[in-house]
Amino acid sequence: MSPAPVLSLVGRVGLLLILAAASAAAAAERAGNATAPKPLRAWPSTPPPGCPFAQSDTLVGVGFTGRHAEYTGADTWYPSWASDGNLYSPWTDGNVNGLSSSSSGEKAATGNATILGEDPLKLVVTNQAVFASSPRPYEGRYPCGSLVYNGVWYYGTYCLHPNGQVPREGITYNWPWLGPFVGFRWSTDFGQTWTQTPCTPDKPLFGEQALQGEPVKIGAPHFVDFGKNLEHSPDGKAYLVAQGASEGANRRYAFNSWITADQAYLIRVTPGIRNMNDPRRYEFFAGNDAQGRPLWTSDFARIKPIAEWRDHMGCVTMTYNAPLKKFLMCVTDGGTTVSRYNTYLLESDGLTGPWKLVSHMTNFGEQAYFVNIPSKFIGPEGRGLWLCYAANFSSGWGGITFKSLPPGSRYGLCLQELRLLAPGDPAAAPEAPR
């Protein structure tokens, strides 16, 4: 999702100013001269009519602290917390420390990098590299599920079609059709070298096809973040959550794209090199039994969503918040794929739901996408955390210029600190942070 070049330049200049300000604030705090923290700014929760998720009674909103940091000039960051304490992430469509990657066309490439540091305001992104993988017969091939477990990095890719910019009825769409999830390549040296997946775009892991815009269920899966080296997995398995759709008749254009969908699906596998590209090793959530307990099946045809909201879902990620013993799910509804986006946060006591609404943040970013919560930066009490995302890649398309809302939202690796609000918390200012 490539940005306009001028925005990348502005973002880099802004990054220098932000890092300088953060450094000065940190120095003042160490000297004992830090000013009192600013009040939280609560983003108004404005779900549209028909929202299927009841309001949570334990987490009732989000408040932004105003602290944020931005890195690089690329998007698609999904950090995985490895046993060595580092974060490892995919990236693409931009540059990291002077190295470029583009996931479009015959020579599509996806990037990987290491993220060093304990303080989100003072991270170092390094060891950047790219790996080429043809998307054919599709037009694009992008990063998705990424996991480093027991020293092996599993890196998933998915396809997009028909091409990067598609004019239709006065709108220039961006990658309007979500293609299939291909499979996992893997590395045993933290991304220095890779072994390509035996799966291919025309023979993907789960057999789905989308060359004519057919709906797919497991198009762009992301690993549930269970903490450092899957330490909080309930059974040692790796779980993946994916956006999808079940039917496509008489639908809006781009109803099932890289950033739009109807449903969220959940699958699981015991992580291992022999297992990750073998569909027989996977189980799929298949609904609940009469007692409300989750059912799992090896039959892909019986897969059921863990959440659904027609024309209001999209890219989905999930993180286990160990201090709160809750699962947090970030969902982004990407509208027309180039419009302002809405991101909402759901919570549940269980992996498969039921899900309740924490906050629906209309126009977050104003065009934030690939939103996730890195478990490494969840505070000890579970209420403080950081959102990871990219933003505003299509500013200027169709005459729409996006604001950086909250401040710091730009094309790149964005980190934004927030606090989950509970009943009885002191009232936060009821407006979006500006």
Image (cartoon, rainbow, N blue to C red):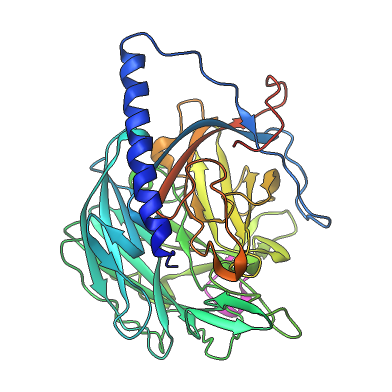
**Residue furthest toward the top?**
32
Q: Quadrant of residue 93?
A: bottom left
Vertical placement of 143 versus 42: above or below?
A: below
In the image, residue 249 lies at what x, y percent?
Answer: 73, 86
Residue 375 sits above or below residue 186 on the image: above
**Residue 292 visible at all:** yes
Q: Is residue 379 above or below residue 106?
A: above
The residue depicted at 36 percent of the width and 29 percent of the height is 22
Image position, residue 166 (x, y; %): 55, 82
Location of the C terminus by quadrant is top right
The image quarter containing residue 186 is bottom left
Residue depicted at x 51% and y 87%: 209
Of 27 and 400, nearer the camera is: 400
Q: Identify which residue is drawn at 67% across, 36% down.
A: 61
Question: Which of these two is toward me, 146 or 288?
Answer: 146
Residue 352 or 117: which is nearer the viewer?
117
Q: Is residue 4 left or right of residue 264?
A: left
Which residues are the magenta region?
296-304
Would you say residue 88 sits in the magenta stretch?
no
Screen quadrant of the N terminus: bottom left
Q: Position of residue 59 (x, y in %)?
A: 67, 34
Looking at the picture, how far across and down is residue 98, in whole percent? 22, 59
Q: Is residue 220 left or right of residue 195?
A: right
Q: Residue at the right extreme?
A: 49
Residue 84 as seen in the image, left or right of residue 222: left
Q: How many marks?
A: 0
Q: Is residue 79 visible?
A: no
